[in-house]
Image (cartoon, rainbow, N blue to C red):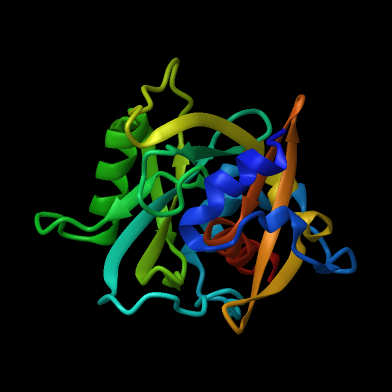
């Protein structure tokens, strides 16, 4: 588990010294979890192919930059193990924004990228060595706008497990997997908030105990996972 000093260093790029210390506003234990039979590859394919209405919940953070927005995309990689997992990264401390935070593979859209899917697949290959042949794109979730002015398109995909990944040390400090069932259970969805620079900020957090280490999933990553929950729960 990160110490408070380490967490402060890792989250300083977004202005919050330690999001774990922010007041807990609530935990959504009363909401139903997504049934396990709705988390199978076949069920996920069917859901993304359907047109059932749903309401996204986390879509835009309060801005704390004046620069022009940039388009970006992330891959939400659901690894097809016996019990599906989601592959996540820990961003390198060398990065200028969101350093040290848990994230999906992804990044800014390049001019040659023909779509959000192209961006997500390219970035996943560059960051963690995920091969496109092992990825089956299911669809998109709504664009998530970060406080750092990135318009992020989450691209959800099924991923065949690879024997090895090859994280880019300049971008990725670590890789880990979280059971999909954990992330789709609102009893693990914390709502936290604090006053920062005169503005009340709120976010979701999904702390996951990975052996002896706590993986603190929060902010944009947790917000997109919350929307995945809402999408699959209807």
Provide residue 147's location: percent of width, then percent of height.
46, 72
Residue that appears at 52% across and 40% down: 88
Q: Does 17 appear above or below 166?
A: below
Q: Residue furthest right?
A: 30
Q: Is residue 199 left or right of residue 1?
A: left
Q: Is residue 50 left or right of residue 170?
A: right
**209 or 81: nearer the viewer:** 209
Identity of the residue drawn at 66% across and 62% down: 229
x, y (%) of residue 231? 60, 68
User: Would you say 152 lies left or right of 16 here?
Assistant: left
Q: Quadrant of residue 92?
A: top left
Give x and y (percent) for residue 59: 52, 76
Q: Nearer the viewer, residue 205 or 113?
A: 205
In which quadrant is the C terminus drawn?
bottom right
Q: Residue furthest top?
A: 163
108 vs 51, nearest the viewer: 108
Classify the position of the N terminus by image quarter: top right
Relative to residue 204, is residue 189 drawn left or right? right
Name the residue located 84 percent from the left edge and 57 percent from the top edge.
187
Residue 21 image-quadrant placement: bottom right
Which residue is drawn at the image coordinates 58% and 74% (left, top)? Answer: 58
Above/below status of 46 relative to 132:
below
């Amino acid at each position: 588990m990160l110490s408070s000093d380490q967490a402060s260093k890792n989250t300083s790029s977004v202005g919050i010294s330690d999001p774990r210390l922010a007041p807990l506003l609530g935990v959504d234990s009363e909401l139903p979890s997504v049934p396990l039979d709705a988390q199978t590859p076949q069920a996920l394919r069917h859901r993304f192919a359907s047109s059932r209405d749903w309401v996204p919940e986390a879509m835009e953070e309060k801005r704390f930059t004046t620069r022009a927005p940039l388009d970006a995309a992330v891959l939400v990689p659901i690894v097809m193990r016996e019990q599906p997992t989601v592959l996540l990264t820990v961003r390198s401390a060398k990065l200028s924004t969101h350093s040290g935070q848990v994230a999906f593979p992804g990044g800014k859209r390049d001019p040659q990228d023909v779509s959000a899917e192209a961006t997500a697949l390219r970035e996943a290959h560059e960051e963690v060595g995920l091969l496109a042949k092992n990825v089956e794109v299911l669809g998109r979730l709504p664009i998530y706008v970060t406080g750092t002015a990135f318009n992020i398109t989450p691209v959800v995909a099924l991923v065949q497990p690879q024997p090895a990944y090859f994280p880019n040390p300049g971008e990725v400090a670590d890789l880990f997997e979280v059971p999909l069932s954990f992330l789709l259970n609102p009893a693990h969805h914390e709502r936290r908030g604090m006053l920062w620079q005169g503005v009340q900020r709120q976010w979701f957090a999904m702390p996951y105990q990975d052996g002896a280490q706590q993986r603190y999933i929060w902010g944009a990553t947790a917000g997109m996972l919350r929307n995945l929950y809402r999408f699959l729960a209807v």
